[in-house]
Image: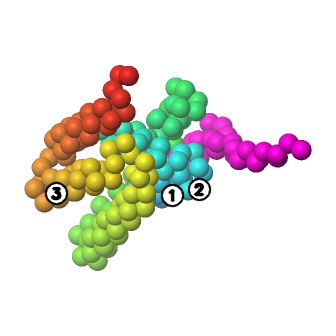
Amino acid sequence: MPEARPAAPEVLPRARPESLTDLFVSFTLLALQGFGGVLAVVQRELVEKKRWMTREEFVEEWAVAQIMPGPNVVNLALMIGGRYFGLRGALVGLAGMLVVPLLVVLALALVYAQFAGNPNVAGALRGMGAVAAGLITATGLKLVTALRKHPLGKPLVATFAIATFAGVALLRWPLAYVLLGLGGLACVLTWRRLGGMA
């Protein structure tokens, strides 16, 4: 009697935006939640809730979005929109990030101009800054697990992370130099580990 083969693991279909409207609404809601530190919101919405990206893909594409000119999350919206719907998707993703939030920001700017000198308002804004720093730190720690399979290996990845933190936070090097220097070196080493052009 032939031995029964184990059933192949079920492959779930990859989640993706259902339409351009879904893309626009999703990025609009995402942008409206991004007070102070949008990284935490973006990661939770795109990776954990909508599952449009894996953690590994998010880390890779966020890195690309960071080295491009302009706001990181806007670059990411362009990339995701372009991936699923081409140029129309890129433009709709961009519109979702900018149109409604722009109207909200203009309204808040008008209100802020009336109360900018109020010490209570200044204290509230400083408090928001502390929360934003905590959100970014928590998201960074959550994404560390996505680096376990990185071609450079854990020790070298940790070395780059520590060197980047030291360069930006302690030595106050310009972010562009850190990105070009350490980021470029990490890219070259990763490329060589992956076999170069072979």
Q: In the rendered image of this protein, does residue 92 appear above or below residue 165?
A: above
Residue to which mark 3 is pinned: 166
For the point 35% across and 56% down, the residue is 109
In this view, the residue farthest toward the front is 1
| Three-letter code for the amino acid on which mark 1 is drawn | Arg
Nearer to the camera, 2 or 121:
2
Precedes in sequence: disc 3 or disc 2: 2
For the point 59% across and 56% down, the residue is 49
Q: In the rendered image of this protein, does residue 47 appear above or below residue 137?
A: above
The quadrant of the image that shows the N terminus is top right
The Cα–Cα distance between marks 1 and 3, rounded to whole angstroms, is 27 Å
Q: Where residue 125 sits: x, y (%)? A: 30, 69
Instruction: From the image, give the main secondary structure of the stretch colored magenta.
Output: loop
What is the number of the mark on residue 49?
Answer: 2
Q: Where residue 16 sits: x, y (%)? A: 62, 41
Q: Which residues are magenta?
A: 1-27
Whether residue 27 is visible, yes or no, is yes
Precedes in sequence: disc 2 or disc 1: 1
Q: Nearer the viewer, mark 3 or mark 2?
A: 3
Classify mark 3: helix, strand or loop: helix
The Cα–Cα distance between marks 3 and 2, rounded to whole angstroms, is 33 Å
- Residue 71 as seen in the image, left or right of residue 103: left
- As for residue 14 lying within the magenta part, the answer is yes
Q: Are marks 2 and 1 in contact (CB under 8 Å)?
A: yes
- As for residue 118 lying within the magenta part, the answer is no
Nearer to the camera, 7 or 92:
7
Residue 181 quadrant: top left
What is the number of the mark on residue 44?
Answer: 1
Q: Where residue 37 sits: x, y (%)? A: 37, 59
| Three-letter code for the amino acid on which mark 3 is drawn | Ala
Precedes in sequence: disc 1 or disc 3: 1
Whether residue 35 is visible, yes or no, is no
